[in-house]
Amino acid sequence: MAEKKKLRESEDAEPEQIVDPWKVVTTSDKGVDYEKLIRQFGSERIDEAMLQRFEAVTGHKPHRFLRRGIFFSHRELNLILDLYEAKKPFFLYTGRGPSSSSMHVGHLIPFIFTKWLQDVFDVPLVVQMTDDEKFLWRELETPDVAQELAYQNAKDIISCGFHKDKTFIFSNIDYITSSPAFYKNMLKVEKLVTFNQVRGIFGFNESDAIGKISFPAIQATPSFSNSFPEIFGDASDVPCLIPCAIDQDPYFRMTRDVAPKLGYLKPALIHSTFFPALQGARTKMSASDKTSSIFLTDSQEDIKNKINKYAFSGGGATEKEHRENGGDCETDISYQYLSFFLEDDERLAYIKKEYSSGRMMTGELKKELIVILQSIIGDIQKKRKAVTDDLRRHYMTARKLNHKA
Amino acid sequence: MAEKKKLRESEDAEPEQIVDPWKVVTTSDKGVDYEKLIRQFGSERIDEAMLQRFEAVTGHKPHRFLRRGIFFSHRELNLILDLYEAKKPFFLYTGRGPSSSSMHVGHLIPFIFTKWLQDVFDVPLVVQMTDDEKFLWRELETPDVAQELAYQNAKDIISCGFHKDKTFIFSNIDYITSSPAFYKNMLKVEKLVTFNQVRGIFGFNESDAIGKISFPAIQATPSFSNSFPEIFGDASDVPCLIPCAIDQDPYFRMTRDVAPKLGYLKPALIHSTFFPALQGARTKMSASDKTSSIFLTDSQEDIKNKINKYAFSGGGATEKEHRENGGDCETDISYQYLSFFLEDDERLAYIKKEYSSGRMMTGELKKELIVILQSIIGDIQKKRKAVTDDLRRHYMTARKLNHKA
C-alpha cells in the first residue's frame, strides 16, 4: 500500500516505475531507478559504513556484488551482523521459481552471492523451489511438470557450490506434502493476511485465481525457522537473512508485517538489482527468450556467439567514431556483465577507462567477457555433471544441517 | 452467482433466505423454505419416483431420512443408482468441521445416513475433517488445537459404526502434509477458481483472510478419487456421492463447475435439511451453546433434563387448552426429533395423530423421545469407549479399502 501511495505522490515530474515479483515496468529511459525503489519500498541503502562494518565483523572483503552496488539495499542487515559478532545463530533463505529446464546467468546472481554468504557466515541455507507457484501462474499443464523443473533447477543450484551439509533445497510440493510444521505456519500466515492486503502489495485483482491470492503465505513461511523442525527443532526461532532480487521484496514486506503477530522474528533482507538482458538494461532477462541471455546449458561456442551477436554495445557505430568518442559503459551490456563477473576491481577500472576513452574496442571488451563467462559457465557445467540424482536427493532431504549454531 | 440472482428476482413478495456454509438466515417465520432452496441452488427434489427406484435398485426400503424428506434434494443421484445397478464402483465422501470436543445429535444426521448408505451400497467412504478450516475461521489459537479436535471428533464418527475396512477418516492438516496427490489436486482447483467466483458462491469479501478465500479448493478435492491414490490408485476416476446438509452445497456447486475443466467426474450429491435446535426450528444447532442441543457426552439424565426443560413444545399452554386444541407437530421440537430418530413409521403416525388431537400430552411425547435418544446416545457412548487411539489411527491411515469395486 505504502509503495502505491508513494508512486502517486511522485506523479509530478519523475518517471513512474512498478516493480513486483511479476513485472518491472518503468517510464524512464534509464531503466529502473534503484534509489527511488529504496524510497518506495522503505528499505535501506547499503552504504559505505555498512560495508566497512561488514568487513570489520566478518574479516572478509565485501563481495564484488556489494562493492559495486549490485546488492544495494537491505532491511536490518545490521542485526544479522550483530548476531554474527555475538556468535549467535541465524540462517539464510533464498528461492527460485523453476521456470524452464535451464537457468540463465541472471538467475545465478542470488545464488553466487548466497553461496558466498554461506561461506563467510558458516550458516545453514534453505532454498525454496516454488513449483506450486509456477504451476499456478504459468501455462504448465500439471504440477508434476513444475516439480520436475524444480528438480532440474536444483541440480543447477547445487552446481553453484553450496555446502553439502549446510544446505536444504526443497520443492514446495514435496515439502508441504511432508511437513506439518510448514503447513501449519502457512495456515497461520493465511489467517492473518487479507485479500485487500495482497491486492495492495502484489496488485492482485478479483479475477485472479484463489491459488495466486493465497500463494504469498507459502513464500513467507520459510522465513520462520520452526517451519523446518528437521533442521532447527520444533520450538526454534532462529533469525533469518534473505538474499534476493529487489522484486521479491513485496513478499517479505508482507512477512515482516505478519511475523510479530505470530510472535516470530522478522526476516532480514539483502536486495540485488536486476541482471540486464543481452539486448539492454531496461528489464529483467527472460527464460523463454533463448537469445536474451546466456544459459547454463550454452556451449562455449554459444556463449561466444551470443555475446558477439546480441550483447548491446555502448561503443561507437564505426571504429573511427569509437576512437573519437569512446564507449558508454552505462549502456554497454558487456561492460555491465563484466561488472557482475570480473572479480578484479583494478582490471574492471582499467577496462572502464580504456573503453570510455575509445582506446579499447567493443570486440576486445566482449572478448574479455567471453573468457570469463566461458570459465564460470564451464565450471558450473563440470560441477553439474557430477550432480547425480542421489546427490540431488541428499540436498533435497530435510535433515539436521551441520553448522556452528 | 445464480443463487444471488434468483434471490434478487424473488424479492417481491416471498421472504428472503440466505443459506451458505456459515449462516442460515431467513426473514420467514416458518424457518428455511427448502423447496425454495432447491430452486435457488438448482438442485433436484428427491421425489417418490426416485425413492421407488432407490428401493427397486438396492432392494432396501429407503431410510427414514429419505421417507420423511430429511434428505430431500440431490444432484445426479440417478447416475449413482445407474452405477449401482451396473455393478460399477463409486465412493462416498462426507465431512465435518471439528468445532468442539463433543459432537451433538445434529452433527450425527449426515453420519447416520452415510453409514446406512455405506451398508446398502457396500462402497468405500472418505471423511474429511476440516481442521485447517476451523483454525482459519474460528478463534482457535493454533492449528494443533483444531487437529486435536479432529481426532476427538473422529472417535465420535467411528462410533457411528462405519465399516472398519471401508472407511478412511482424515484430518486435512495430516493428509495434506502427507499426500502429494491431494495437494496437486488442490492446486489444480485453486488455479481454476477466481476470487470473483468464491465471492459469488460463498459471499467472501475483500477483508477476508487469504486462507479463507482459497479454502474451498480443499473441500472440493476429496470429490476426486485420484486425490486418494492409496485407496483408488493414481489414475483412478471413481465417481463420488456426497451426503451432506444443504448448506454445504455451495462447495460442491463450485466443485461440479471445476471438475469437467480438469477432466474429472462431477460428484453427485444428496442433501439434508437442518436439524433444529431444542429451542426451535428457525436455525441450526450451535455447538457452543450447550443448552441448544443434546451432545454425545450428555448423560442419560442430561438427555432427559434437557428435553424436558428446553425442547420447544407445540402443545397447549395448559392441560385443558392442550386437550381442547391439540399440539402443533410442525413447531414441536420433540415431535421433530422423533421424526429424525423414531424408525417405526406407524408409531410416528400414531404419535402425530394422538398429539395433534390433544389426546397425547407434551410430557408423554417427550418421554417417547427421551427413551429413543437415551438409547441412541447410550449406544454411541458404549461404542466410543471401545475406540482406542490405535483404532482411530487405523481409520485415519490412508490405505487400500476393502470393497467390491
Image (tube, coloured by chain):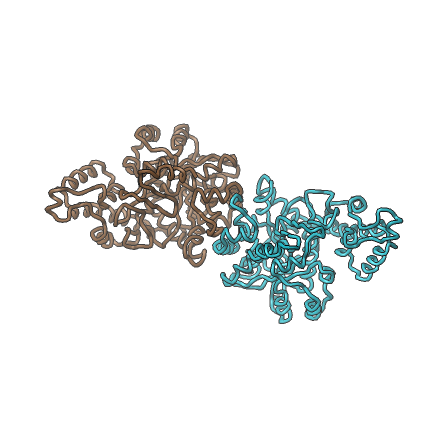
Chain colours: A brown, B cyan
Left-right relation of B349 to A162: right
Q: At x 61% / y 58%, what residue is drawn?
A: B41
Q: Position of residue A145 (x, y in %)?
A: 42, 57
Q: Is residue A295 visible?
A: yes
Quick one: A310 or B101, which is closer to the camera?
A310
Q: At x 49% / y 38%, what residue is drawn?
A: A258
Q: Position of residue A127 (x, y in %)?
A: 41, 44
Quick one: A374 or A10, which is closer to the camera?
A10
Q: Position of residue B385 (x, y in %)?
A: 72, 48
Quick one: B377 or A159, which is closer to the camera?
B377
Left-right relation of B62 to A258: right
Where, quadrant-wise, is the C terminus of chain B in this rendering?
A: bottom right
Where, quadrant-wise, is the N terminus of chain B in this rendering?
A: bottom right
Q: At x 66% / y 63%, what residue is drawn?
A: B45
- Please determine whether, in this image, residue A53 is positioned above or below residue B8: above
Q: Position of residue A70 (x, y in %)?
A: 30, 39
Q: Residue furthest front?
A: B12
Quick one: A20 or B205, which is closer to the camera?
B205
**Quarter location, residue A146:** bottom left
Count of numbered labels shown in the rendering: 0
Q: Is residue B168 visible?
A: no
